[in-house]
Amino acid sequence: MRKFLLSLALPLLSASALSISAYAQNSLSPFEADYKVLYGDIGLGKAHFSLPAPEGNYYQYNFTSELSLLFLSDERSIKSKFRRTDHGLEPMVFIHQRTGTGSDFSEQVAFLKDKSIVRSNYKGEHVELPFENKLYDTMMVQLQFRQDLIDGKEALEYHMVKDNEIDDYSFKRMGEEVLNIDGTEYRTLRLEVIRDSKKRKTVVWMAPDLAYLPVRMTHFEKGDKQLDVQLTGYRFTDTAPAPLAANP
């Protein structure tokens, strides 16, 4: 879940009202977003998301983070390549690299739709998983999640490949809330991850005016706040998603 929240930093100018009204009602509108990451009230570092303009129906969603606490460090780079289809977003390649204190590791996932399989390599262990129905990686699922909120879909249920397994995540709407982050107010929809255990709780606040861009994400363990991710800057580009082209 932490990877999803982080996977969920350079200063950016705020988007203008014109940019928001023109492009922020589609989760595939190219954008950049920066976040600060805290452990409780202690600053750990920063995270950066970017979705450049696509090449036809093909996209690449990027994530980097740099976290540290005393002599501990954690740096990550994630790239998610996917395509847009008539049925939604379809994953293609996912690459996750982690360096820092402790053991470095990497994760590579190839989604082979034509063969109905997923080939995953996590920490040097190779597995094959079935590619059935709708399946996502832990990055591009964020964009599908946002688009589902824009489209007003009731069921927010997702199957994701994570750590050589297929995990299921579901969200429930908790109502609207106005958040103030560093003096900036955001009108948000609060959502919570549905879990069997009450020992863990994950809450995310999404801004409808920003195509449901996450404004804040908080994770609790046994009632204590463990991870808090807050938006510090965002920018939508002046390129709107093109009409869906015929896939080869």
Image: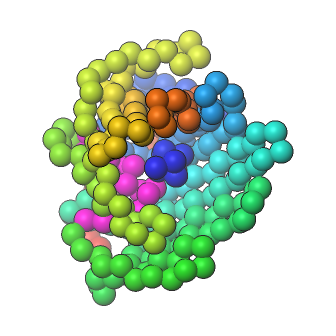
Relative side of 64 to 236, left or right: right
Query: In the orientation shown, which residue stands out farthest toward the bottom?
Result: 115
Residue 43 appears in the rendering:
yes
Q: State the residue in front, 127 or 19.
A: 127
Relative side of 127 to 170, left or right: right
- The image position of residue 208, as x and y in percent, is 33, 29
* Identity of the residue drawn at 57% across and 52% down: 63
Numbered disc total: 0
* Identity of the residue drawn at 41% across and 39% down: 199
Relative side of 16 to 28, left or right: right
**Relative vertical location of residue 16 with respect to residue 211 in this rendering, above or below:** above
Q: Main secondary structure of the magenta part?
A: helix
Of the 4 image quadrants, the one containing the C terminus is bottom left
* Identity of the residue drawn at 57% across and 59% down: 78
Q: State the residue in front, 173 or 123.
A: 123
Image: magenta residue range: 134-149
**Relative vertical location of residue 224 with respect to residue 183 in this rendering, above or below:** below
Query: In the orientation shown, which residue stands out farthest toward the left?
Result: 154
- The image position of residue 198, as x and y in percent, is 35, 37
Query: In the orientation shown, which residue stands out farthest toward the top?
Result: 183
Relative side of 150 to 57, left or right: left
State yes or no: residue 240 in magenta. no
State yes or no: residue 145 in magenta. yes
- The image position of residue 19, as x and y in percent, is 44, 31
**Relative vertical location of residue 95 with respect to residue 177 in this rendering, above or below:** below
Q: How is the image coloured?
A: rainbow
Residue 213 appears in the rendering:
no
* Identity of the residue drawn at 56% across and 36% down: 227
